Image (spheres, rainbow, N blue to C red):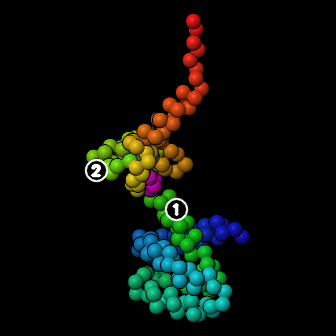
Amino acid sequence: MSVTRIANRYAKSIIELAQEQGKLEPVHKDFQQLGMVAQNRDFQLLLKSPIIHADKKIAVVDTLLKGKIDELTLSYLHLLIQKGREQYTTEIVAEFEQQYRAIKHITQVRITSAAPLTDSVLDTIKVKILASGKTQENLEIETVIDPALIGGFVIEFDDKRYDASITSKLDDLQKLFSKNLYIREI
């Protein structure tokens, strides 16, 4: 079975269980925390190691996370380890986040600009994006600074990209001039 299908199934199962028990928000916070812990190289090596027995992995997870996360999430991690799916934890966390955003109608938007944007500019951009009707009603905006853009900004969400940067406009002009459409008549 592909990693994507495994991550999809396991993420869907915990989301459905959390919704049934009314614990979606606490489990979401737990998964955000688990995502940070899973970035640790030693923790990744522990989970992916075929030499370390499941009982040892469960003991380490308990030591690290017991009392810090909900019992449902901890039981779920135990199940992952017992089923031998713990090496897919990072992928399951990422898939959980995607499915959570779909349930909560959240669109993740990335705005790259040459300089930091003020709150009023971000609010204006947010209003325009929402008015376009191409996103969900809730936006999660991430801003990135890239001086190579010279000016303007680039907006990315879902599989869409709106490029209003100076660099893009200059590239377009360069392509236009390289065609040399001007015909000199004497």
| Residue displayed at 66% across by 69% down | 3
Q: Label 1, secondary structure: give it.
A: helix
Residue type, numbered disc 1 = Gln
Count of marks overlaid on the render: 2
Residue 115, given in percent of the width and then of the height, sits at 34, 49
- Which residue shows up at 46% across the image and 91% down it? 63
Q: Locate the C terminus by quadrant.
A: top right
Figure check: 125 above or below 103: above
Q: Position of residue 56 (x, y in %)?
A: 57, 93
Tell me what residue is drawn at x 57 percent, y 75 percent.
89
Q: Residue at label 2?
A: 119
The one of 12 and 86 positioned closer to us in this rendering: 86
Apparent side of residue 165 relative to residue 96 in the rendered image (left or right): left
> Looking at the picture, does residue 49 appear above or below residue 39?
below
Residue 54: quadrant of the picture: bottom right
Which residue lies under the disc numbered 1?
A: 98
Mark 2 neighbour class, 10 Å CA radius: few under 14, some 14 to 19, many 20 or more: few
Q: Which residues are magenta?
A: 105-110
